[in-house]
Amino acid sequence: MGAGSDKSGTQGLRRRNLRERRCVQQEEFPFPLRGENGTGEERDVPGLSEEQLLHALLAVAVILIVGRGAAEIARRLNQPEVLGELIGGFFLGPSALGLLFPSVFRALFHDEGVAVALSMLSWVGAILLLLIAGMEADLGILREKIRPGTFAALFAIVPSLIAGTLFAQSVLDRPLSSALFLGIVLSVTAVSISAKILIERDALRRSYAQVILAAGIASEVLVWLLISVVAALRTAHPVLGVGRSLLFAVLFFAFMLTLGRRFTFWAMRRIADMTQIVKGQLSLVLVLAFLSAGITSALGLHALLGAFVFGVLLRPAPRASTQLKGDIEALTVSLFAPAFFVLAGMRVDIFKLGSWSSVGIVLVLFTVATVVKVGFVALGAKLGGLPGWESLLVGLGVNLKGGTDVIVAILGAELGFLYDQTYTLYAVVAILTELVSPPLMALLEKRVPPSPEERARLNQEEARRRAYLPGIERILVQVLPQLYPAQAAGVGGLVARLLHIDEFAA
């Protein structure tokens, strides 16, 4: 065969196996590449055979059709698109397609080379999702709502971490590292899902919405450090491993906030102002996002942390326009995100639950996770100064699942912290939460009208958004007797073309 993999749906071959494996027959590779293996002997670089390429293309097409179709159905039912994509993946997985049409399921998804290609597509989707989540992290929101946001974040993370760990140890009989990882998954807020739902309801600038985002952003930053700590517990020297992870995290943050920030701003200006490459800024952002992800992966902090931090830096960067963000979202939403969430849903195998008693365990986990998170987050928001109904609304928003939490759960399964049964349990809990939380939020929103001060702020923001002058791009042209209006307009048009501005107002 061409490329191989250790298990279907896993990260694929380890680097050592990729180096050691070689093709058996030359005709399996339509475009063979030759290289040196260190001893002077030539070897073939692994690649997909014609049959594997056909199956991979068909698999991607089926994933997109089912994922986007299920997302459309979810939208028509006033549910988040990600819920539809997860459920669509469930029907493509072993619980439905694998049961009803096993030969089709094996042909599409069980080939080793196809599994590697789909796994890579999925992880690129995860990186881009975290990049977008970082770009949604408004540091101004964090500063403005620092008190209720901090209380909500602390009361979301710590109780959920403890509850998840105790549940995994007492009910699921899991070892400490696996139990801690389930606690981490329960503590994460799906901030991208929260933001998407708030945007759909035109409530993103409400005070309670800002607290939800602030708490969610804090949990997403902290979760990657917690993952590094848990991973260090499996090493021969756990204390040294934890210290190493924390040191690398501090150094990475310090680098990104200083040299990384300066380079990003400089590169964004240069690409926008000095080149005429079509979508050059988009290519630059993808390159820098993958490099940031690669740095954190090399440091043992995981690639997704690097993508998220780069997204935070990119938000205030020069020339980081709404169009650029739209291009990134279009690329992600149209291909990579559906692939990621459909493949996540395909991991759900109800036959691995073992027995009908597992249904009761799912309901217990769903109840424990919801009550603990919603209750404690509402208490934290209340202590932070929010009214009662608004605090409960914050609790429901922070409890949303289906975004980063699913990414963390998949990572736990990849690293061996979460068993397949535990992942399936949590995936079902995430789907149930997506079904229950948005309707409850819609009901509570009717009880939380804007206060006079909040309404005044929202009206002022809307007036600024609709204003004419802020939308005008201004340039300064030196006034000379020889410079007539026509020449001034020509200078302005030249600058507009350099800045890639479609419309220029003189």
Image (tube, rainbow, N blue to C red):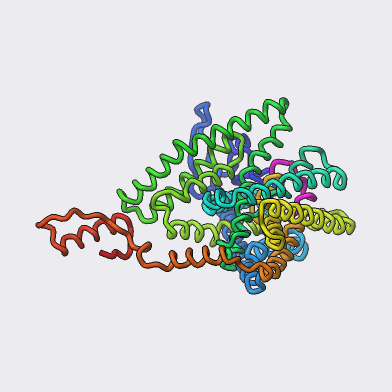
Res 13 → quadrant: top right
Q: Residue at x 33, y 58 (%)?
A: 500
Res 96 → quadrant: bottom right
Residue farthest toward the left in the current orientation of the protein: 482
Q: Residue at x 67, y 45 (%)?
A: 411
Q: Could one spot residue 104 in this view of the protein?
A: no
Please state the horizontal and vertical placement of residue 467, each as a whole percent of the image. Answer: 40, 67
The reply to whether the magenta stretch includes residue 443 is no
Magenta-colored segment: predominant secondary structure: helix
Please state the horizontal and vertical placement of residue 297, each as a whole percent of the image. Answer: 58, 38
Closer to us: 114 or 265: 265
Q: Is residue 34 above or below residue 453?
A: above
Q: Residue at x 78, y 46 (%)?
A: 419
Please state the horizontal and vertical placement of residue 22, each as a whole percent of the image. Answer: 58, 39
Q: Residue at x 33, y 62 (%)?
A: 472
The reply to whether the magenta stretch includes residue 424 is yes
Q: Could one spot residue 313 in this view of the protein?
A: yes
In the image: residue 44, left or right of residue 361? left
User: How many numbered marks does the figure carry?
Assistant: 0
In the image: residue 210, left or right of residue 502? right
Q: Is residue 265 above or below residue 358?
A: above
Residue farthest toward the bottom in the current orientation of the protein: 76
Q: Quadrant of the C terminus?
A: bottom left
In the image: residue 333, left or right of residue 464? right
Q: Which residues are magenta?
A: 414-427
Closer to us: 128 or 450: 450
